[in-house]
Every structure is written in structure tokens, then in C-alpha cells.
Amino acid sequence: MRLPKRSPSSSLPCRREFLSTAGLLAAGAMAGELALARGVHAAGSDVLKIGLIGCGGRGSGAAANALTADKNTRLVAMADAFADRLQTSLQTVQKKFPTQVAVKPERCFVGFDAYRQLIDSGVDVVLLATPPHFRPLHLQAAIAAGKHVFCEKPVAVDAPGVRSVLATCAEAARKGLSVVSGLCWRYHTSVRETMRRIHDGAIGDVLSIQETYLTGSLWYRIPPTQPPLWTEMETQMRNWYYFTWLCGDHNVEQHVHSLDKAAWVMNDQPPERAWGLGGRQVRTEAKFGDIYDHHAVVYEYANGTRLYSYCRQQPGCFGDVSDLFVGTRGKARVGEIRKHAAQGAPEWRYDGPSCNMYEEEHKALFGAIRSGVPINNGQYMARSTMLAILGRMVDYSGKAITWEDAINSRVSLSPVKYAWDAEPPTLPDKDGRYRVAMPGVK
């Protein structure tokens, strides 16, 4: 894809910050070849010891993907806020991988500080799969301790979290540590080939992008009616998907996959600004916390390209999860490219080998560790997350917001402290309902 060059006066918002970080990532990757030449990993053994932080469905899946991707790995430690979630996950993964799971009781860590105990337990690789709110904190701790990381998406729920992740990934590059993102489509064979062709000019200059993630409703965990009752913090943690401070809203937690493909097409350059609309039309019960059930956002790029983003979680509606890229010479979807009739060029469809992208992520991570040539996905996983956060910001506020203002926002969604008797950032009113953002209302 050939994008018009920018003049100095139209440079990207926060361009210096991002280019500086990118330079650190690249320099760190080269330095890492020497840093890791001392052995396969810190322990000097062929077996890589894995620790899982976050033992929900995605965490269990990530552990299974990792153990499948490299047979010379062992899951040796697990951590979660809840003991029951940890034990369920352990039983599930152990049943499927009896020879690769060696998690002793003393390496099962529970509570808000469990991540620190796991990181200090002697693991080589850490899988981060907690609710997104905790990603910046856990990533920072893992890299500070010299661990390689698989980092699920999204990587933050607010701009301070994104900036933290960028700084941490730059530190990982300096240390020669690998960081692989859970934005799995970047590792899918047909998507990679489609993107290569688009970047080579197969559809000309990209004029517009349409990203849709229209799905139904998700799970909900019912609080107990008999003692021991859940505190407000536990209620929200158990149902983390419905609270913005924990998940970022579903356009961040889920739709980030689609937005990441759009960002990829745009060479990971951020837009100038965004505006949009969203709301809470069907999923209105108090139990669904404070998130919306639909979002529509328009992202405007400096070269004139526009990204139209739609996501919805409402049952009984039309469903669609797709990507459409329209250029001056044709249009593309994942796995196919069609030229405009006037071009008279043949269509292309991917007919190469398939893959399990969830496993390919871990193959890339373990391959980097074993080869001594680090891989660092920090730049794009942070930018794509911020793209989604910007979408939430414009929908919640009803305002048009620039990338520069969004990435530099000081608004933090973190609680004052992490404890089961502590107050989360969002509290119910006397009727048990949570305050939902109203566009145009402060």
C-alpha cells in the first residue's frame, strides 16, 4: 500500500514518542542476539518452564496452545485471583497434557499478588491472560524480572496503561527479552499473505476500511445468595467483562482483533482523530455493569483514508465478523483480492497452507527464545489497543477526539487499592445500578 508522504507540519500525533520507542525495540532486538547467545534461556536447559497468570477460559487455552506448540515445554506454575478458577484450569490442562503439566501445590498462587509469586517461582516464560486491566502491571513485573512473555490482547484499558506497556516493551527490547502478542491474526497465514499483497499495492492506495464484529451476548456469573457472599470487588472481578475498568468495554476487549487488522493495513500509523456513537440499548440490566452493547466509530487518517468500525453484542440480530479494504485499484477481504473491473486484472484467492494461529503465536515465541533472536510485538499491540480505547472515548463522550489528546490522557481507571474489601472504581447506586456514560454529559 502506498500512502502519501506527510509534510513536517502534518506529522503524526506523538510521532516522536512512537518512533523513539520503535527505535528502542529495534535496537534491543539486535542487542538481544548477543544477550541471549549465552544459552537457550536463563536456565541453560532445553526445557522451557511456563507460568500462567490468569486461569480463565482464555488462559487455559493459551496454556494448551503453548504446550502444543512446543513439546519441550512444561507448565510448572499457575496464578489467579480465585482458587476455584485456578483448580478448574489446572485439571483441564493436566488432563490434556499429563506429561507436560507439573504444577505442584506450592506453585499454585492465589490473590491479587499471585502474579508476583509466580514470576519469582523460577519460570522462564510467563503467559498473561488476566482481565485486560491488569496487563500493564503484570507485564512490567515480568519484564523487570527478566521473563519472556506471551501477552494476551488487549494490553490496557486506558491511555496511562498503554504508555506503561510501550515503556515496558522498550525495556524488554533493551534486555533482549521476547514479547509476543495475543493479537493472533498477525500470525495467520492467509491474513499475512493478504496484508503483504495490499502493502505491495494490489488494491492501490487504500481509501477506506470497514471492520465489523457483530455478535450475540456472552456469559454471566450469578453471585451467590447464601454466605459466603461476594464483596462488590469480587462481584465485578467475577464478571469482569461488564465493567469498563476491567475490560475496557467490548470494543476494546473483543473488537481490538478487527481494529488490529485495520491498523496493520495502515502500517500501524495512528489516525489523526476519531468520532462516533454508541450506547446500551438491549443489555440494560444492572448486572451488565457499565459497558455499552454497541459502538460505531469513524477514524480519520491524515492521508484521507477513513476506517469505519462497527461492533455489537446483542442477541437475535444480524451477525458479521469481517474486514473490507477498498483501494483505488480494487478491494480485499482476508484471503481474497478483487480488482476493479476497469483494471482487467485477475482475482486472487489464498490457496496456501492453513494454520492454527493460536499455536503459531507460541511457536514464534519459543522459536525466538531458542534461537537467541528476540521478537517484540510491543509497538503494534499497544497502538491497536489505543485505537480501540480511542473509540470508546469518543463514544462515551460524544466528542471528536484527536489521537494526540487520547494517547496523552491522564485519566486512569485503576482502583485506589487491590483488595477484596476495597472499593472498585465503579460503584452501584442505592438501586444496585452502575453509572453508564452518557454522550454529551459530563
Image (cartoon, rainbow, N blue to C red):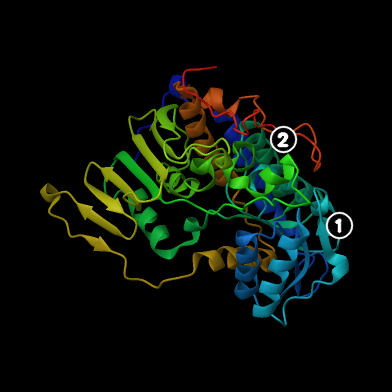
- In the image, farthest residue toward the front: 226
* Residue hosting label 2: 424
Q: In the drawing, does residue 417 fall left or right of residue 168?
A: right
Whether residue 280 is situated above or below residue 87 in the rendered picture? above
Q: In the image, what residue occupies the spot 31% across and 65% down?
A: 350
Q: Please tell me which residue lies in front, 22 or 47.
A: 47
Q: Is the C-beta separation of discs 2 and 1 under 8 Å?
A: no
Whether residue 381 is situated above or below residue 275 in the rendered picture? below
Name the quadrant of the C terminus.
Answer: top right
Q: Position of residue 74 (x, y in %)?
A: 74, 73
Helix, strand or loop under label 1: loop
Instruction: Mark 2 vs mark 1: give the one in front.
Output: 2
Q: In the drawing, does residue 81 fall left or right of residue 8?
A: right
How crowded pointer 2 is (Cα within 10 Å; few <14, some 14-19, many 20+) is rated as: many
Q: Amino acid at mark 2?
A: Pro
Name the quadrant of the N terminus.
Answer: top left
Q: Amino acid at mark 1?
A: Asp
Q: Position of residue 414 (x, y in %)?
A: 71, 34
Q: Position of residue 339 (x, y in %)?
A: 19, 52
Q: Is residue 385 visible?
A: yes
Q: Earlier in the sequence, mark 2 or mark 1?
A: 1
